[in-house]
Amino acid sequence: GGNNNKLSYSLNYSLLTTKGIDETTDSTGIATGRDRDGYTQHNAYGSLTYRPNNKISVSPFVRYSAFLQNYDQGAFTDELDLTANSKNLQAGLKNEFVIGKGKLILNYNFNRISRIYVDDSVKSRNGYDTYNKGDYSGIEHFVDAFVVYPLGKGFKITGGTEFRSSAASQNYFSIGLYPFESKYGSDSVKQHQNSVYSSLLYNSGNGINLEAAGRWNRHSAYGNNFVWNFNPSIMTGKHLKLFANISRSE
């Protein structure tokens, strides 16, 4: 990592690997060919922040992780070739703009994940299947824009809007005594939501705090709803805080 007056950056990589343990219990003491279920994970992360002046900040980032693990089919069933492979990519951008006394924040996040589970019965066979494979993949988008503005005399208001959407596909296939196949495409496993929200915060400076907030959601599956909450609190001395929470959801 490093930085100067306008630019800062950070790069990270980590590797975690373990030979694992045998996740099953052999109560007979005569089982052979048992294995330890290992795990390997890679993580990489990079971020960049650019500040051309004290009123603008632009910060993109990217994160990638992948892991491969072996695991068993239950507490008493050792499995030699059952694996799970997962990959996750996250990327986003955070922007901050100082406008007068207020601040405008714009965020975007993207997430893609895939998981694959395979039991090919090459080293061992358990249950009814000689082969099975399940895979899941999904993507999500999230956009958020809000303003924070001080009103004076201890009051501050926050207001914004957000949009999020996701889609996924799921497939399962098995060969054995009872063959089975199931498929769900991303055109059917999907949802999106639009929201508008606002909150008003009061801090008296002598221990009294009040917050009132509301949020309206429009979801592609369950429709429209409005939620709100009210949170008063007071500090009495240095060690005691009295507070309440009143909220409504649907």
Image (cartoon, helix red, strand yellow):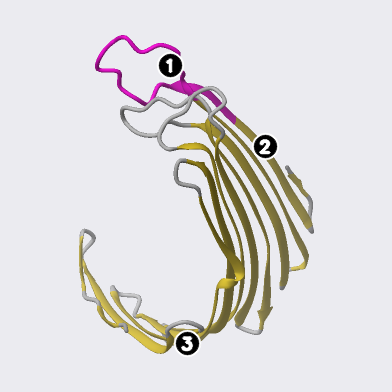
Q: Left or right: where does residue 233 sit relative to residue 161?
A: left
Dot 2: element: strand
Q: Residue furthest front?
A: 177
Q: Nearer the viewer, residue 106 or 182?
A: 182
Q: Which of the labelled discs sits on residue 152, or is there none?
A: 3
Residue 157 seen in this snapshot: yes
Q: Nearer the viewer, residue 47 or 239?
A: 47
Q: CA distance from mark 2 to mark 3?
A: 45 Å
What amino acid is found at the position of numbered circle 3 in the picture? Gly
Query: Where is mark 2, residue-wise?
Result: 13
Q: Left or right: where does residue 138 sit relative to residue 53?
A: left
User: Residue 170 location in percent, x, y?
Assistant: 56, 58
Measured along the vertical axis of the image, is residue 61 above or below residue 146? above
Q: Which of the labelled discs sits on residue 34, or is there none?
A: 1
| Quadrant of the snapshot with the N terminus | top right
User: Residue 119 location in percent, x, y?
Assistant: 53, 35
Is residue 202 one of those drawn in magenta? no
Q: Residue at x 65, y 69 (%)?
A: 108
